[in-house]
């Protein structure tokens, strides 16, 4: 089945550790996105990529890093510089410019908790 | 820049009744999309309905319809014949439809929790 797979579903991070959240899609979409969701708030954009080997900062990029070496994959690293990383993280993809390019399809999310 | 505001943190409706969720937005884009997404307790984001700003006709998808008032920058969602499965958090979102690095970036509202009473 085509879709977006995020792993792991739950992740625990110790203080000072870097952790990487995985996002893979087999929809052949050009664009991929990472969003953060905090309780009682909407989703906020961390990073996005419209093409392989290129990505842009979103509204809350500090303390995060990404790579886009393959069209199918867009991993997010939460670094030790992110002071409040406990949140729910959602990955999304969209076809890109042309057609219904703006419609985003979402993964099932990763719940990250600092212990 | 885009902003999306949902002024109703919570709404409730009786099963089989109709409910309307409100959304206002602001954007500097000349062309854009508007969306309603549903997030049930599983936290999977599901697209409910989409509206292209250049289209005057309001979008409909079965029991879901929108009232798009472009001049007022308003985009409300009407759910008819509400079902227990409609209970979820609903998010309004906007996205530019012009080329460039902003294309496809979704800006979300704060969400409205919808409770459906049997």
Image (spheres, coloured by chain):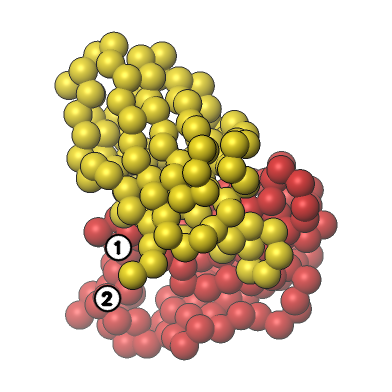
Task: Say above or below: B90 vs A8.
Answer: below
Question: Which label sits on residue B40?
Answer: 1
**Residue A84 place in picture, x, y as percent:** 35, 22
**Residue A113 place in picture, x, y as percent:** 23, 30
Q: Quadrant of the C terminus of chain A?
A: top left
Q: Is residue A100 visible?
A: yes
Give the letter of the yellow chain. A
Secondary structure, mark 2, is helix
Chain B is shown in which shade?
Answer: red
- Tell which circle, 1 or 2, labels the residue nearer the N-terminal end: 1
**Residue A101 place in picture, x, y as percent:** 63, 63
Which residue shows up at 38% across the image and 57% down it?
A4
Which residue shows up at 44% across the image and 79% down it?
B79
Secondary structure, mark 1, is loop
Q: Is residue A1 left or right of residue A12?
A: right
Query: Mark 1 falls within which chain?
Result: B
Q: CA distance from mark 1 to mark 2?
A: 9 Å
Q: Quadrant of the N terminus of chain A?
A: bottom left
Crowd band around label 1 with a 10 angstrom C-alpha radius: few (<14), some (14–19), many (20+): some
**Residue A106 place in picture, x, y as percent:** 42, 57
Q: Is residue B89 visible?
A: no
The residue tagged 2 is B85
Outermost right residue: B30
Q: Is residue B76 left or right of residue A42?
A: right
Which residue shows up at 25% across the image and 59% down it?
B42
Q: Is residue B50 left or right of residue A87?
A: right
Q: Exactly how many numbered labels are in the figure? A: 2
């Amino acid at each position: 089945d085509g879709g977006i797979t995020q792993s792991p579903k739950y992740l625990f991070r110790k203080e000072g550790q870097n952790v990487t959240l995985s996002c893979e899609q087999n929809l052949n979409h050009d664009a991929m996105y990472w969003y953060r969701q905090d309780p009682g708030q909407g989703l906020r954009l961390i990073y996005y990529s419209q093409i392989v080997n290129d990505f842009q900062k979103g509204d809350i990029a500090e303390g995060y890093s990404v790579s886009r070496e393959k069209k199918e994959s867009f991993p997010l690293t939460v670094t030790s510089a992110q002071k409040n990383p406990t949140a729910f993280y959602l990955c999304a993809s969209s076809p890109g410019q042309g057609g219904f390019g703006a419609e985003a399809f979402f993964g099932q999310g990763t719940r990250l908790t600092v212990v | 820049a885009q902003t999306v505001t949902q002024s109703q943190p919570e709404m409730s409706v009786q099963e089989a009744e109709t409910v309307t969720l409100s959304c206002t937005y602001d954007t500097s884009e000349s062309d854009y999309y508007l969306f309603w997404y549903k997030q049930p307790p599983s936290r999977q984001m599901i697209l409910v309905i989409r509206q292209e700003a250049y289209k005057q006709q309001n979008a409909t998808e079965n029991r879901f319809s929108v009232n798009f008032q472009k001049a007022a920058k308003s985009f409300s969602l009407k759910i008819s014949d509400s079902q227990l499965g409609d209970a979820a958090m609903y998010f309004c979102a906007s996205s530019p439809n012009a080329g460039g690095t902003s294309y496809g970036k979704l800006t979300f509202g704060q969400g409205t929790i919808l409770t459906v009473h049997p």
